[in-house]
């Protein structure tokens, strides 16, 4: 849990220009990321940015993006913040669960669980 | 790329929705096992980099000075349908990572507090946390050996739980058992939201 080799961290901060945390808003773990404006992006993109654009062709929660990239959450957030700033992804802030959990969703979740 | 260029928002009719559920409880009570039992993916593992604010441990000179340590974050996923998922997040067991709970708990549907009757006191912090923040939770009593049965009334009394909070005997290694705990939580959480249900 602690005492990780600091080597990878140095590389990680290379990915984010030394930033440990995203500027401004942080994205919730289950905020939905969607690629917008095509896949290619500008020339010279780093592989991690390309990987996000490819993955998020399908709506994908932030936690899954981090896991797929095998990057810490806050590093992932910096990357996502950059991509959003450049208009390459949209990130939907989750609505309060009391609003999203209507009767239909509730039934779907219960039926889904019971069929496991 | 073999993919038709898709316009944003056309992939699914309804907006994608990921519902957050927390799995809490003392160290070694079976949180990670529970996530692994029910998740359709091997529990994914990411790490949270922590700043030194409020922690004050480990000086990693040579790296950015704010970064001191990492904490593992394990989570699992249950796909209900395309664009509707349950995400199970195991809460960090160590006390010094309490502040992370606030982020995990934000917007969560509810929580499962796992309890081990041999160490019920380990569940107190999680129970207190969710009670104070009015986050719906159920208590899952992990019965490590099927032979021993526990009296839910005693567990309720020992943990000081209100009558309405469900207590479920479970075996976190058993898929059906974990499913029952989650079903109980979802029902309890949604019933508490609105008189409509």
Image (cartoon, rainbow, N blue to C red):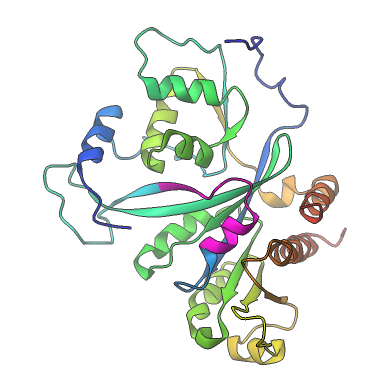
* A45 left or right, relative to A89: left
**Position above or below: B52 against B162:** above
Q: Residue at image x 85%, y 45%?
A: A104
**Position above or below: B132 against B42:** below
Residue A85 visible here? no
**Position above or below: B12 against B151:** above
| Quadrant (top left, top right, bottom left, bottom right) of the C terminus of chain B | bottom right
In the rendered image, residue B163, in percent from the top left (x then y), is placed at 74, 83
Farthest residue toward the top?
Answer: A43
* B66 left or right, relative to A89: left
- Work out whether residue A89 or residue B69 is closer to the camera in this orientation and state it: B69
Segment tinted magenta in the rendering:
B32-46
In the rendered image, residue A23, in percent from the top left (x then y), is placed at 36, 35
Residue A6 visible here? yes
Farthest residue toward the right?
Answer: B196
In the rendered image, residue B30, in percent from the top left (x then y), is placed at 53, 69
In the rendered image, residue B74, in percent from the top left (x then y), is placed at 48, 53
Q: Residue at image x 46%, y 23%?
A: A51
Q: How many marks?
A: 0
Q: Residue at image x 34%, y 10%?
A: A44
The quadrant where residue B27 appears: bottom left
Q: Residue at image x 74%, y 60%?
A: B186
| Quadrant (top left, top right, bottom left, bottom right) of the N terminus of chain B | top right
* B56 left or right, relative to B28: left
Residue B151 magenta-highlighted: no
Residue B42 magenta-highlighted: yes
**Position above or below: B23 against B83:** below
């Amino acid at each position: 849990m602690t005492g990780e080799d600091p080597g990878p961290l140095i590389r990680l901060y290379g990915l984010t220009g030394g930033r440990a945390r995203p500027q401004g808003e942080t994205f919730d773990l289950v905020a939905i990321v969607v690629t917008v404006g095509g896949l290619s992006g500008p020339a010279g993109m780093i592989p991690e940015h390309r990987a996000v654009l490819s993955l998020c062709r399908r709506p994908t929660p932030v936690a899954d993006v981090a896991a797929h990239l095998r990057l810490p959450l806050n590093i992932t957030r910096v990357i996502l913040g950059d991509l959003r700033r450049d208009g390459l992804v949209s990130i939907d802030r989750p609505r309060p669960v009391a609003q999203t959990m209507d009767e239909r969703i509730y039934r779907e979740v219960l039926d889904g669980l019971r069929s496991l | 790329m073999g993919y038709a260029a898709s316009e944003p928002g056309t992939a699914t009719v309804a907006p994608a929705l990921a519902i957050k559920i927390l799995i809490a409880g003392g160290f070694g009570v079976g949180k990670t096992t529970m996530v692994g039992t029910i998740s359709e993916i091997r529990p994914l593992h990411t790490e949270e980099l922590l700043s030194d604010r409020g922690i004050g441990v480990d000086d990693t000179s040579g790296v950015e000075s704010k970064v001191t340590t990492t904490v593992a974050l394990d989570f699992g996923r249950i796909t209900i349908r395309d664009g509707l998922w349950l995400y199970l997040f195991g809460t960090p067991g160590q006390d010094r990572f309490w502040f992370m709970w606030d982020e995990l708990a934000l917007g969560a549907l509810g929580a499962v507090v796992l309890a081990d009757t041999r160490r019920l006191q380990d569940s107190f912090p999680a129970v207190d946390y969710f009670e104070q923040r009015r986050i719906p939770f159920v208590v899952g009593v992990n019965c490590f050996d099927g032979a021993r049965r526990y009296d839910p009334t005693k567990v309720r009394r020992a943990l000081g739980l209100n009558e309405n909070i469900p207590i479920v005997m479970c075996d976190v290694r058993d898929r059906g058992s974990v499913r029952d705990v989650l079903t109980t939580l979802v029902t309890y959480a949604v019933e508490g939201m609105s008189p409509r249900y």
